Image: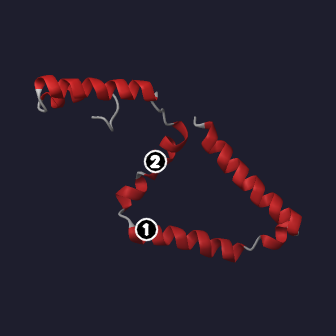
Amino acid sequence: MDMSTLAGIIAGCAFMIISIMLNGQLSSYYDLPSIMITLGGTFAATLVAYPFERIASLTKVVRNLFFSVEGKPQDIISTIIELANIARKEGLLALEEAAYRIDDPFLQ
């Protein structure tokens, strides 16, 4: 899990609640119809703007947000250098064959 993402969400919510509490009571900022209009309108606008298949894949995006695994820059650089050497020695068509051995979807 990416701890900085989780820490950022928690810190943002905490700062928002603390700033409201310093200015008044939390209940004075809570209005159910306003929340329903904001969240419902956002959801409805999203349904109108995007096809349902793309909205359904949102769970995959959220999962990647918290559980993504990033490679080390040194490993990525060495892979790119290796691919450059293959392209220089064997030609660009040899890169297609080398792409099957790469785990990183971006580099593939």
Q: Nearer the viewer, mark 1 or mark 2?
A: 2
The first of marks 1 and 2 along the sequence is: 1
The colouring scheme, among rainbow, by chain, secondary structure or one colour, is: secondary structure
Q: Camera-side residue: 90 or 63? A: 90
Residue 61 shows which numbered tag? 2
Q: SS at mark 1?
A: helix
Q: Residue at x 18, y 30 (%)?
A: 95
Residue 102 shows which numbered tag? none
Q: Residues within 10 Å of mark 2 (few under 14, many from 20)?
A: few
* Image position, residue 62 (x, y; %): 51, 47
Horizontal placement of 61 versus 1: left or right? Answer: left
* Image position, residue 86 (x, y; %): 19, 24
Q: Residues within 10 Å of mark 1 (few under 14, many from 20)?
A: few
Tag 1: amino acid:
Leu
Please determine whether, in this image, residue 84 is positioned above or below residue 38.
above
Res 23 quadrant in image: bottom right
Q: SS at mark 2?
A: helix
Tag 2: amino acid:
Val
Q: Is residue 102 visible?
A: no
Please determine whether, in this image, residue 54 is positioned above or below residue 60.
below
* Image position, residue 76 (x, y; %): 38, 28
Q: CA distance from mark 1 to mark 2?
A: 17 Å
Horizontal placement of 10 versus 90: left or right? Answer: right
Res 81 quadrant in image: top left
Residue that label 1 marks: 47
